[in-house]
Image (tube, grey):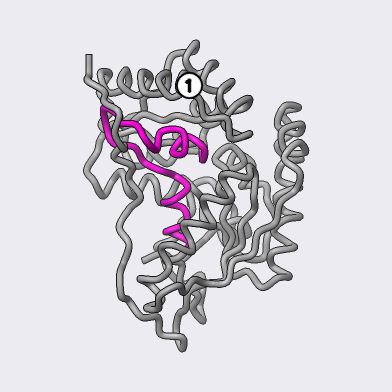
Amino acid sequence: MLALSLARPALIYGNTESGRRMDNRVERIPHIGIVAGTADGAALCYRTLCQEAEGLMGHRYAHPEVTLHSFSLHRYLDTIDRDDWAGVAALMSQSAAKLVRAGADVIVCPNNTLHKALSLVESTVPWVHIAIPVVREVVARGWRRVGILGTQTVMKGSVYAEQLHRANIGVIVPDQDDRSRLHHIIRNELIVSALTINSTLFVQRVIADMGLKGAEAVILGCTELPLLMSNYQTAIPLLDSTRLLAQAALRYKVQEERHSSEDCLIDRGTVTRDQERMICANHR
């Protein structure tokens, strides 16, 4: 059995470029729009944007414009429980329209589950897909097999699986009983900020089991999971999807030809040209 100790986990956020100045004639830190799902997820994303922008902007306390829009969470949860992903996309599209009117250059959604509906969203500005910076971090670190934790939709769906498959990265998910318990914990505890020791120990054990099955790291595909695990050691490194998403948004380049780059945060194999223009984000 892999040993566990009570210490801070090896959460992977990615590398922050420090001290780089932005040339406002060609590119600038974007006005970032946040489509909020859960309160803690949106708050973590906003906090990360503010904390990590200083190095990019070259000034203490500097961060870009950030605008957040949120519908009542019950509207999303009720729509998801009806398996109405077009309805989820409609809510996200309404949020996007409000953010665009507020001046957002690029949009992020720090909620992994909602990304199942992203291809159905209508938007006139690009979105950064949460899975892309996470998978890039996996590839950059040379890992070939990773675990994934989140809701049932995230663990067994396509939000991460397709991107990982295209990168030839193997995926490990918990067994059915553990997936069901984790989904229950997320829906009934974590999204209302109830962080319990029993749930923490359960997640620790699941991570250790995935390590024993060959996972070299585990994707925390639920915003609240890093908050749950913040004071605990895990057997293998953890990838914090929300922080990696925020970092990708900060590195988004607003250029005269925004969509000219071939290096885009989209899955070109599954999106139409209109959707590509919506999701594409030039990324260094």
Q: Is residue 56 above or below residue 33?
A: below
Q: With 245 as the anchor, is 36 left or right in this view?
A: right
Q: Of residues 46 and 135, which is closer to you in this image?
A: 46
Provide residue 133's location: percent of width, then percent of height.
Answer: 40, 51
Q: With 266 as the anchor, is 212 left or right in this view?
A: left
Q: Quadrant of residue 124?
A: bottom right
- Amino acid at circle 1: Ser
Q: Is residue 161 above or below residue 256?
A: above
Residue to which mark 1 is pinned? 199
Secondary-structure class at tag 1: helix
Residue 256 appearing in the image:
yes
Provide residue 241's location: percent of width, then percent of height.
Answer: 44, 44
Provide residue 81's location: percent of width, then percent of height.
Answer: 72, 27
Provide residue 46's location: percent of width, then percent of height.
Answer: 54, 57
Q: Is residue 15 above or below residue 73?
A: below
Taking the magenta stretch, the answer to whether it contains residue 230 is yes
- The magenta segment is 223-249
Q: Is residue 133 above or below residue 237?
A: below
Q: With 125 as the anchor, is 71 left or right in this view?
A: right
Taking the magenta stretch, the answer to whether it contains residue 67 is no
Residue 165 appearing in the image:
no
Image quadrant occupied by the C terminus = bottom left
Residue drawn at point x = 26 percent, y = 50 percent: 140
Q: With 231 as the anchor, is 77 left or right in this view?
A: right
Residue drawn at point x = 71 percent, y = 33 percent: 77
Residue at the farthest top position: 177
Residue drawn at point x = 55 percent, y = 48 percent: 110
Q: Of residues 80 and 86, which is closer to you in this image?
A: 80
Image quadrant occupied by the N terminus = top left
Residue drawn at point x = 47 percent, y = 15 percent: 178
Residue at the farthest bottom position: 25
